[in-house]
Amino acid sequence: MYRRYGKRLLDLIIVIPALIILAPVMAVIALLVRIKLGRGVIFRQRRPGLYGRPFMLLKFRTMTDARDAQGRLLPDAQRLTPFGRFLRSTSLDELPELFCVLRGEMSLVGPRPLLMQYLECYTPQQRRRHEVLPGITGLAQINGRNALSWEAKFAYDVQYVEHLSLWLDLKILALTLWKVIKREGINQPGHATAEEFMGTPPLPPRPPAQPRAVSSD
């Protein structure tokens, strides 16, 4: 019952007042992004949603559009500005995703929506993360966020799918506020954000079993 109806009701009960209260904050952030990063305040990108169906993710921009001599975008570390780092560390860049929740494309809690090209890299077990709506926060985010390995993130995502409940959602929302205050797990070690997911390497084959010696006595 909660999975089918209650979860959406909880999203609306929280998101509608939040958008009204946070509207002035979002307006100020939008103005600062325009001043510091130039035109294009909102970052839009197609991401896989429920059952892998694409939707348009909305976030505040945190990077410049700096390119090399060949016209290719520079690495994230070179395009991420100090202001952008602040937005990411405080999760303020995520506020436009509240509109995605309002439209029913995301939920407050669920596996994070990643890149479309990752769909081809998941194992069947990892692909189960798309059995629910993607979320602004989730079980992986309160257990390490970007500091986790991809395999650990996906394990938490599937765990959430299997144990989804009102109590778990409320617990994740409460712990998310604490994690945002502490600013933990913002990026993977050695990366400005997170390394690209290239797929989980298959387990090495087991060595053949050695024949057991049979006594002739």
Image: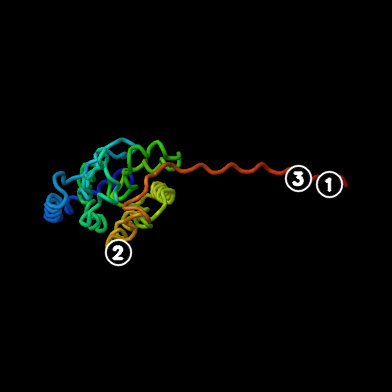
The dot on residue 182 is 2
Between 209 and 107, the one lying in front of the other is 209
According to the image, label 1 marks what residue? 215
In the rendered structure, which amino acid carries the disc numbered 2?
A: Lys
Q: Residue 198, position in %: x, y? A: 41, 42
- Image position of 165 (left or right of 38): right
Q: Residue 126, position in %: x, y? A: 43, 43
Between 142 and 90, the one lying in front of the other is 90
- Image position of 170 (left or right of 87): right
Q: Earlier in the sequence, mark 1 or mark 2?
A: 2
Q: Residue 45, position in %: x, y? A: 25, 40
Q: Residues within 10 Å of mark 2 (few under 14, many from 20)?
A: few
In the rendered structure, which amino acid carries the disc numbered 1?
A: Ser
Secondary structure under badge 2?
Answer: helix
Q: Report which quarter residue 122 is drawn in.
A: top left
Calculate the distance from the C-alpha at mark 3 to the C-alpha at mark 1. 10 Å
Calculate the distance from the C-alpha at mark 1 to the C-alpha at mark 2. 65 Å
According to the image, label 3 marks what residue? 212
In the rendered structure, which amino acid carries the disc numbered 3?
A: Arg
